[in-house]
Image: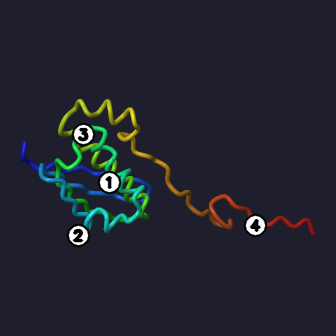
């Protein structure tokens, strides 16, 4: 199989469009390498978790286009996109990835600020008199 696989991953406000091709493990995240774009090692290990679980680390070249959100949200979006791509390649990966919760889209979003409130839920200080 030498064709390119395209998947989308989302987390919070972040969206990742990812293109995966068989290769040597080269990363291109918005024109930079994985270590340059995500300097925190915990985020890099979280992103590579689907590859380590399926023993495919270094077998695919990744081109990821990230937009929106923060650093942690973008890392989660990349991780979901990779997991979805690995399932497209081999359906037997799905059980292992689901076991570790990598196939589920984390639907938690920031609650919007309501009118007449200090924040989403915070009330102004109560004054009896």
Q: Are marks 3 and 2 in contact (CB under 8 Å)?
A: no
Q: How far apart, in angstroms, are the residues tagged by discs 2 and 1?
A: 15 Å
Tell which circle, 1 or 3, labels the residue nearer the N-terminal end.
3
Above or below, 129 against 48 in this view is: below
Q: Residue at x 34, y 52 (%)?
A: 47
Q: Which mark is residue 124?
A: 4
Q: Farthest right residue?
A: 129
Indicate the position of residue 2 as horizontal and vertical percent values: 6, 46
Look at discs 4 and 3 and give the one toward the viewer: 3
Q: Pointer 2 and pointer 4: residues touching (CB < 8 Å)?
A: no
**Is residue 12 shown left or right of residue 61?**
right
Measured in 3D between alpha carbons, the distance from the residue under mark 3 to the one under mark 2, in whole angstroms, is 26 Å
Query: Residue 120 appears at what percent x and percent y?
Result: 62, 60
The residues bearing labels 4 and 3 have C-alpha atoms spaced at a distance of 53 Å
Rendered residue at 23%/69% (across/down):
31
> Looking at the image, is 102 positioned above or below residue 125?
above
> Which of pointers 1 and 3 indicates the residue nearer the eye?
3
Q: Residues within 10 Å of mark 1 (few under 14, many from 20)?
A: many
- Kindly report the distance in space between the C-alpha atoms of the residues bearing marks 1 and 3: 18 Å
Which residue does the numbered mark 2 point to in the structure image?
A: 31
* Mark before the other along the chain sequence, 3 or 2: 2
The answer to which quarter of the image holds residue 75 is bottom left
Estimate how packed mark 3 is, as few (under 14), some (14 to 19) or many (20 or more) residues with alpha carbons within 10 Å. few
Q: Work out whether mark 2 precedes mark 1 in sequence or the reverse, and give the earlier one.
A: 2
Labels 1 and 4: the sequence-earlier one: 1
Residue found 41% across the figure and 38% down from its top: 101
User: What mark, if any, has residue 55 been given in the picture?
Assistant: 3
Estimate the spatial distance between the alpha carbons at disc 1 and disc 4, rounded to whole Å: 39 Å
The residue under label 1 is 78
Q: What element does badge 2 sit on?
A: loop
- Cα separation, mark 2 vs mark 4, equals 45 Å
């Amino acid at each position: 199989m030498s064709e390119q696989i395209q998947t989308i991953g989302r987390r919070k406000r972040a969206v990742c469009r990812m293109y995966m091709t068989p290769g040597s493990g080269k990363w291109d995240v918005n024109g930079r390498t994985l270590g340059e774009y995500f300097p925190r090692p915990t985020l890099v290990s979280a992103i590579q978790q689907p590859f380590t679980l399926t023993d495919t680390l270094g077998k695919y070249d990744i081109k990821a286009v990230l937009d929106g959100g923060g650093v942690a949200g973008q890392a989660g979006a990349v991780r979901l996109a990779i997991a979805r791509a690995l399932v497209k390649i081999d359906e037997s990966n799905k059980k292992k990835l689901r076991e570790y919760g990598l196939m589920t889209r984390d639907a938690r979003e920031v609650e919007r600020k309501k009118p007449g409130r200090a924040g989403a839920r915070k009330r102004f200080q109560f004054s009896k008199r």
